[in-house]
Amino acid sequence: MTKAGEQLVTFHLNEELFGIEMEHVREIIRLPEMVRVPGAPAHFSGLANLRGEILSVLDGRKLLGMPEAKKSDTVRVLVLEHRGETAGCLVDRLSEVVDLEGFIEDELKTAREREKLLSRVVKKKDGTAMIMVVDIEAIFPSLEETTGVSSASVQELAHEEKETLSGSGGTKQFMGFKLGAEEYALPVEEVQEIVRVPAQISCAPGLPHYIDGLFSLRRQTVPLLNLRRYFNVDHDSYGERAKVVVLNLSKGEKKSVLGFGVDAITEVLRLAEEDVEPLPELFRGEIRKNLKGVCKLGEGERIIYLLDSRSIGEEDELGLESAGEEGEKMSGGKGLSGEELYVVFFLQEEEFAVSINSVREIIRLPEIVRVPQAPPYVEGVVNIRGEILPVVNLRRKLNLPAEEKNERNRIVVVDLNGVSTGLIVDSVREVRKIAADQIAPVPGVLQSCLEADYLQGVVKFAGTERIILLLKLQELLESAERMELAQMSCDVREVKADEKEDEGADR
């Protein structure tokens, strides 16, 4: 017999009637925007941002082995709670809330071999209604061994990556960008984030000619300095690839933010001290004050000027004041609120991110040399300034559909436990600062059904449905796979060295 006062929220899936105990239903919502998660089982529809809470959404049809159907306006998501976890379940349409008084339990075999997903079957005594009750344990599997990663742990992992890379031969990271035909770069630690050119810019009177105006960025008022105008380069309007590099500048107790309007972001560079040369003597006047040095790459084919942002930001006529409450929290690339810079990129229209501390550089697709008998996810190797690096196709590694290469593709060069590796991504969206309180642990419901533990956390944004998946680079490849990549690079280097020796002998 059923318990007195027990109620079920009932719903339809493929014209069949199911129910779930009312005590587990927190709310019912319309179909939200969802982010697909690579490697998740077919019944896992994706992650949704529900008013700042990360919600795992399961497809009721697929969970119960039913054929997929086109989503209609009647589709709803039951937001369920159990053992402190939250998850959503997609249903075709709602029916009603049923009081089980007058119902009796029937044999579970009438459920057509769905015993693992159903807890029981109830029906009216007169046989006019039958409801299959979904087992809440099937939605929330045991999580004793799949505890989530806290946001503090995420920051600790990022810090570990930073410590690992800090001893890499005295190198320093720079953010590269273009102005006209020339390339410039800024130290990464000065960059707060990189954003699109805002639609609304307030043109206050009395500002210098090279200041486009002021714009608002999360309670900060940011002056937008047009670098083209500042350097007297022709400028009409910002193009589609234009970005604003938001910098944190400080002098003593004075802290301020300043946006540099640039034509495009090119890549993240890791440069050693010996890569940077002093400016030639022909550079005189203001331009010499605004540049720290020059870097030559590709045997001198590429020249990158290193910009001194503070010499520009300290111009008396800019009159920059303290950036206010949020600006005081930010200094030198990491704020009191545990903020870190992340490189955000696309894979199959979904957003992923890795800590910029683990990124050596971001480059366009060069010529990739195929390697015989390489694993399917390995695209080949590339030669970056004399260094041979293996290249992993992230789409293949995460079992995503293949896509033709295009001009938006990039290679993100990262450190995978001591092995420098290139990751092919669809495109790079931005570099932005993310606070610790914006990072949620991977939901237990998702973590329990992923085959690989490659997710480090989930970034959520208040007031928006946007979600970014943080990759755990340490777990992206298994230990044997990392060794295989390292050996592959060594083999290619040996072949190249032998070819050079042969060429020398021929001469």
Image (cartoon, rainbow, N blue to C red):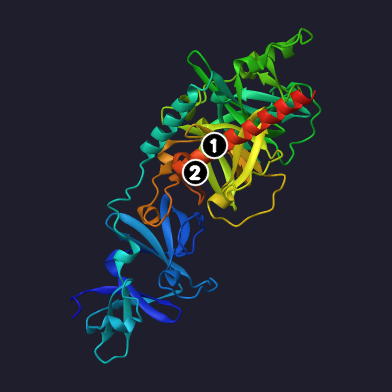
Does residue 176 lie above or below 406 as drawn? above
- Residue 501 picture location, percent across and down: 70, 25
Q: Is residue 194 among the parts visible in the rendering? A: no
> Quick check: 494 above or below 379?
above
Residue 95 is situated, as x and y percent measured from the top left of the image, at 39, 77
Mark 1 or mark 2: whose residue is earlier in sequence: 2
Determine the image quadrant of residue 487.
Answer: top right
Q: Nearer the viewer, mark 1 or mark 2?
A: 1
Q: Residues within 10 Å of mark 1 (few under 14, many from 20)?
A: some
Q: Front-most of 323 and 386?
A: 386
User: At numbered mark 2, what does the secondary structure look like: helix, strand or loop?
Assistant: helix
* Residue hosting label 2: 481
Q: Is residue 400 left or right of residue 57?
A: right
Q: Position of residue 295 (x, y in %)?
A: 69, 19
Dot 1 lies on which element?
helix
Residue at the disc numbered 1? 487
Report the amino acid beneath label 2. Glu
Instruction: Indicate the quadrant containing the N terminus: top left, top right, bottom left or bottom right.
Output: bottom left
Q: Looking at the image, how many numbered discs can be counted on the residues?
A: 2
Q: Name the quadrant of the C terminus.
A: top right
Height in image: 388 above or below 462? above
Q: Image check: 431 left or right of 435?
A: right
Q: Which residue reaches farthest front?
A: 505
